[in-house]
């Protein structure tokens, strides 16, 4: 690992390169923070959810962010656990993306639950037969593995930082290393071994916890479209597709170097994403075609699926889920397989629009009414099957996205996510 | 009610918790006049905030003033719906922290308001749509004439755990609530308020496991049914169909037709 110091002064163009992102993040943060504050301390009802549609945008977004995290992590595990060498430059970047997405997911769900201060009750009173309890326990284990991997992956850089002139870096390094400065060479081999073990533990863990999110829905027998044994696999496939796509997009557009190794890496990731997209498309086709093929069967399942396909919000499925998440990106991966830029566009298209997939899983389940006659105007607006995310819900989501983007950008700018050598090369270009 | 819901049901002999007592409710649909007194009594006693109803009257037609069916086979029937206090409650199984639990001594399904984290997984799992969430802080203005039960109620059953606050007059924002069979009243030897105030005596409350209880007597030999029995939730609320019975499933067709029961 290199110990080359970064140039003290950045070039003018490099310094201003990120200004639009900082402005965007600051804007989203300021706008969203108002919603977050109101959500925490306000007394009113702010979301469009009802007693019949108790989960809305935030639950869907949480599942989306968790998927991004799991996908990015699984890619990092291909390097650290399975030694896929071509991914070597992106290992730490993938790990940090995974933890940033996990932070977004946890912030979103903390905003959604009614009593976030009681979250620790799941450790104290957790019931082993609740999938939600399992999910939280698995997240905790995943979070610890991620932290451990990040520490080991960055340890050598932190050693260098102990002598840094930058107060921020020096302090961060001292905190992380608890003031101890070992000889990097002595710890490097041991760290690599532990990192490999953690990455290998992380693979089943990431599959289990994101499959667990699928199981959280699938085990609810009373919601017809969720109660499907393939749901956990569908979630893991979606995680690999969306998380991998996010990482690929970030590497294409934000990687400091534009050399042959970068091109080779992006083209490789483009191929992986195309295969992922095809597997995901196959799962999606099965999800809809099998229950609807003969036109009879579970009425409630069919009504939910019909609502997705032809209901009021048909465009969420056809425009976002089918076109922007699946078909167009797969076509771009194929026809643009030699162009990193096209691969990047396809990847961001999938990664951003994948939220629509999660919305189309969570919300339509509630459309299939178990007991008719429940909707009665005198009961008030909270007893309704009608739901569309309101501005407040999007506003709070903007806050979460700002946090995530901020973490990623700061990580890229401050943490040694990328080899110093590469960074210097990029800065000097 | 589904078509197969009309099969004769009988109370089970033991609850899922192993108790020999199982409190339940029998609703005679033929006697119900749809006056909403049970709902209003429930709302008042249990201090339910604006916009929350633990008990609801479902209209078996598309409009409150119209009958269902086709002339001359018309009927005007109502189905009241509240927590079914299932023997096998889906809401209990999904709760990650055990805030929802089934009381061992009588099988009543309760929520510990101090433990609920407000994840609403239970609302998602409940097939009856009888759970409500406190989306906002309840109105704290003290009423000049408070009708509701104003004291907190801690579950006295030692097997439920310590300090299980299962009733409080103003539930905080961010917790789920539902019918408790008026736990604060039944623990004092009273019947739920909906049973007491029903002017048509359409609601009978008692121990389903006691063959001599009124509820058991009403169920035995009648066409009493549960809602959505195919889900295996084993509700403790039974409905006795009216003399004029429905012969088609509302869930499947959204329409009712009626015929004279034989």
Image (cartoon, coloured by chain):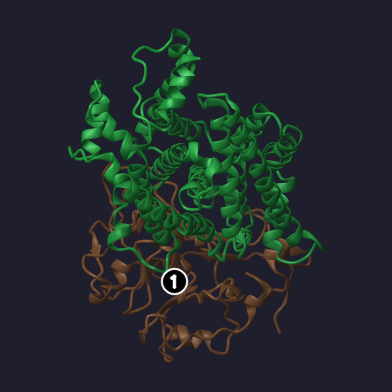
Chain colours: A green, B brown
The residue most toward the top is A12
Q: In the figure, is residue A369 to the left or right of B99?
A: right
B183 relative to A81, above or below: below
> Horizontal and vertical percent for residue A60?
53, 45
Residues B30 and A258: in front is A258
Residues A279 and A324: in front is A279
Q: Quadrant of residue A23?
A: top left
Q: Secondary structure at mark 1?
A: loop
Residue on which the image places disc 1: B85
The residue most toward the front is A185
Q: Quadrant of residue A331?
A: top right
A236 relative to B78, above or below: above
> Horizontal and vertical percent for residue A36?
38, 33
Residues A57 and A144: in front is A144
> Horizontal and vertical percent for residue A128?
38, 68
> Horizontal and vertical percent for residue A166?
26, 21
Quadrant where the image shows the N terminus of chain A = top left
């Amino acid at each position: 690992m290199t110990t080359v110091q970064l140039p003290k002064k950045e070039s003018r163009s490099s310094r201003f390169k990120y200004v639009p992102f900082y402005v965007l993040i600051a804007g989203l943060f300021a706008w969203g923070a108002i919603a977050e504050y109101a959500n925490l301390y306000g007394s009113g009802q702010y979301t469009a959810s009802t007693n019949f549609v108790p989960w809305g945008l935030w639950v869907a977004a949480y599942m989306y962010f968790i998927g991004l995290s799991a996908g990015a992590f699984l890619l990092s595990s291909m390097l650290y656990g399975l030694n896929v060498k071509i991914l070597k430059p992106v290992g730490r970047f993938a790990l940090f993306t995974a933890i940033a997405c996990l932070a977004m997911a946890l912030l979103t769900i903390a905003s959604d639950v009614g009593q976030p201060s009681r979250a620790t009750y799941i450790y104290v009173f957790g019931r082993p037969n609740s999938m939600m309890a399992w999910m939280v326990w698995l997240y905790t284990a995943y979070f610890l593995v991620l932290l451990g991997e990040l520490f080991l992956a960055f340890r050598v850089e932190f050693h260098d930082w102990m002598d840094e002139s930058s107060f921020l870096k020096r302090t961060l390094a001292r905190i992380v290393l608890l003031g101890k400065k070992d000889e990097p060479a002595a710890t490097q081999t041991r760290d690599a071994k532990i990192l490999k073990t953690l990455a290998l533990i992380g693979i089943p863990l990431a599959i289990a916890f994101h499959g667990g999110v699928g199981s959280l829905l699938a085990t609810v027998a009373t919601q017809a479209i969720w109660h499907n044994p393939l749901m956990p696999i569908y979630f893991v496939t979606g995680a690999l597709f969306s998380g991998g796509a996010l990482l690929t997009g970030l590497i294409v557009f934000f990687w400091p170097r534009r050399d042959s190794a970068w091109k080779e890496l992006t083209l490789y990731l483009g191929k992986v994403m195309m295969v992922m997209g095809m597997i995901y498309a196959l799962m999606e086709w099965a999800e809809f075609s099998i229950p609807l093929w003969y036109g009879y069967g579970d009425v409630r399942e069919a009504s939910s699926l019909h609502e997705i396909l032809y209901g009021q919000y048909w465009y969420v499925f056809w425009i976002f889920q089918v076109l922007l998440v699946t078909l167009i990106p797969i076509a771009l991966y194929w026809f643009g397989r030699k162009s990193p830029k096209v691969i990047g566009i396809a990847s961001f298209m999938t990664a951003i629009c994948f939220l629509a997939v999660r919305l189309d899983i969570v919300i339509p389940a509630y459309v299939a009414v178990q007991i008719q006659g429940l909707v009665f105007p005198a009961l008030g607006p909270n007893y309704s099957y009608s739901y569309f995310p309101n501005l407040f819900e999007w506003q709070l989501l903007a806050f979460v996205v700002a946090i995530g983007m901020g973490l990623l950008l700061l990580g890229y700018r401050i943490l040694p996510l990328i080899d110093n050598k590469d960074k210097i090369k990029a800065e000097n270009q | 009610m589904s078509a197969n819901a009309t099969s004769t049901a009988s109370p089970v002999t033991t609850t899922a918790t192993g108790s020999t007592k199982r409190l339940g409710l029998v609703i005679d649909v033929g006697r119900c006049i749809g006056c909403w007194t049970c709902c209003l009594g429930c709302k008042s006693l249990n201090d339910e905030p604006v916009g929350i109803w633990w008990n609801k009257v479902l209209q078996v037609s598309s409009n409150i003033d119209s009958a269902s069916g086709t002339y001359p086979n018309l009927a005007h029937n109502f189905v009241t719906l509240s927590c079914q206090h299932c023997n096998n409650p889906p809401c209990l199984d999904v709760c990650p922290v055990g805030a929802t639990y089934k009381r061992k001594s009588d099988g009543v399904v309760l929520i510990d308001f101090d433990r609920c984290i407000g994840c609403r997984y239970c609302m998602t799992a409940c097939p009856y749509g009888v759970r409500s969430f406190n989306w906002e802080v309840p109105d704290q203005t003290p009423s000049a004439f408070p009708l509701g039960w104003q004291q907190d109620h801690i579950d006295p059953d030692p097997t439920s755990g310590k300090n299980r606050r299962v009733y409080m007059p103003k539930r905080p924002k961010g917790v789920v609530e539902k019918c408790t069979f008026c736990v604060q009243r039944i623990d004092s030897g009273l019947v739920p308020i909906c049973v007491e105030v029903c002017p048509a005596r359409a609601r009978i409350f008692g121990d389903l496991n006691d063959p001599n209880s009124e509820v058991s007597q009403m169920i035995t030999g009648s066409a009493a049914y549960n809602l959505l029995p195919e889900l295996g939730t084993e509700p403790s609320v039974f409905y006795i169909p009216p003399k004029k019975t429905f012969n088609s499933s509302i869930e499947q067709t959204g329409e009712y037709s009626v015929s004279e029961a034989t």
